[in-house]
Amino acid sequence: MYVVLGGGISGLSVVHYLQKSISKHVKLIEASSRLGGWIRSTRTPSGLVFEHGPRTVRPKGVAGENTLALIEDLCLVSKVVPIPYSHPTAQNRLIYVNNALHALPSNSICSLFFTQPPFTKPLVSALFQDLKAPRNLVKDESIYDFVERRLGKEIAEYAVSPLVSGVCAGDAKEISVKFLMKSLFEAEQAHGSIIKGTLMNILGGKLRNTFQSKCELFERAEKEKWSVWSLDGGLELLPETLGISIKKHKADVLLNSPCEEIIFQTGKAAVRVRKEIFECDHIISSLPAKQLAPLVAKQHPELSEELFSIPTVTVAVVNLHYKGSLLKNNAFGFLVPSSQNLPILGIVFDTCCFPKGDNTVLTVIMGGRWFERFFGEDSTPGRLLSTAVQYVHSILHISATPEDHQVSVLNNCIPQYVIGHYERIERIKAYVNNHNLPLSLVGASYNGVGVNDVILSARTAVDNLIKNIQT
């Protein structure tokens, strides 16, 4: 028997891939009362959707192709709602700087040669700086420092800082460039500049990397030039469908069942759950590293310490519904650089992406790396709601009272890949291998925080497990 810890999207994906590959019994153990993890969608009686976690997925690269293949496996193709690059929300990305909303430069070549506020010089100057800047041979550094050194302070401040806030609710001055933007880091290390390294990779054909088997939906996404996609009725339809599928294929799913301890025996393992002990051949943990750490501390304190050292941040999500079409900008939304010292990380314009009649739906995202600073002990739903409404009013000039709202606090939801994360993950992998532990680690704590990343980590773990069985 195999035991999978955690019923979020990565744990569910592990069970799905196991069931496709082997005939052994699989038991999924989830501490909460529901499956899906941080992917959660609320469908309101009026037909609107509030997304409390991830809302769109990018169809790019191996990870993007893998997720679309999963969508095909689950017969969800008819539910896919794509947004092409030609859509205004894909074209228009905003940042909030110095009390004003600014459009980020478009992807066109022409935009490189014009100065667009808040930038004070054309972006082409950043490319020249990259070509002139000396190579800095280091093991790792922050994304902010890397970009400031190679492309200039304004790119670091107005492009990278809000990007990092949007991706992982983190501080660009702390997040590892080696892990989150590995290709750019390696381009400098190998070739002395981002531009030279990228060109060499293109000429060498290193950037093309897809599965051997063709995914028709991925080919469609490329042909139709999708920017992102979601699912009709909300992204939670994906874990919901996975849950139905794995139960149909006889997986044993335990809800409200927090794992209390992992016990490793020679070549085997066991988990203690609600005073019961389940013995198994292998454990695949999709738990956040900090939750896994105490479960292995008794037998493997060194591993536990490494796992516990991966920091996380808390994010508040406030969904707001207003009557009428109240937005002046047809855009995906806006992000806020950390230098603006605001409690909000950004606001998503949901009904610009997916219109729902004469309604405006917004998602205000707050806190992250700065949650404690701005909210501390006073993170009540009322305080969070009033803060969200205040910034919708002051930035978007919407003074109406929301028709409906939901407030969610996602405690310790996003791991932070701080400087040295790559080396830490290598140490964790080495420890597990050197001690021959029947344990695989998947999920956002290790190899990427996005939906695509964690689903691919699930597939990779199962593929590696099957290879080890066959050898």
Image (cartoon, rainbow, N blue to C red):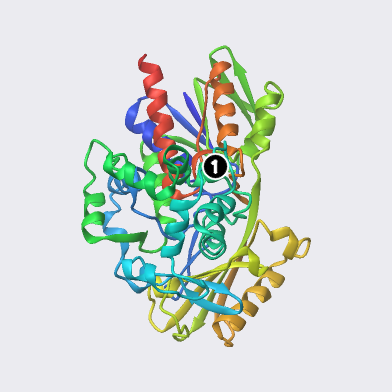
x, y percentage for residue 114?
40, 74
| Residue found at the far top of this picture | 266
Q: Position of residue 97 (x, y in %)?
A: 58, 74
Q: Residue furthest right?
A: 377
> Up-down: is 21 above or below 125?
above
Q: Position of residue 147 (x, y in %)?
A: 53, 54
Left or right, 390 with reference to 459: right
Task: Out of 404 and 188, give the one closest to the viewer.
Answer: 188
Q: Nearer the viewer, residue 346 or 133?
A: 133
Q: Quadrant of residue 265?
A: top right
Q: Amino acid at mark 1?
A: Asn
Q: Nearer the viewer, residue 350 or 224?
A: 224
Q: Is residue 60 above or below residue 300?
A: below
Q: Residue tagged by mark 1? A: 136
Circle 1 sits in a helix, a strand or a loop, which is it? loop
Q: Is residue 285 left or right of residue 111?
A: right
| Image quadrant in which the C terminus is located | top left
Name the residue: 45% across, 71% down. 350
Image coordinates for residue 326, horizontal then vertical, percent: 47, 85
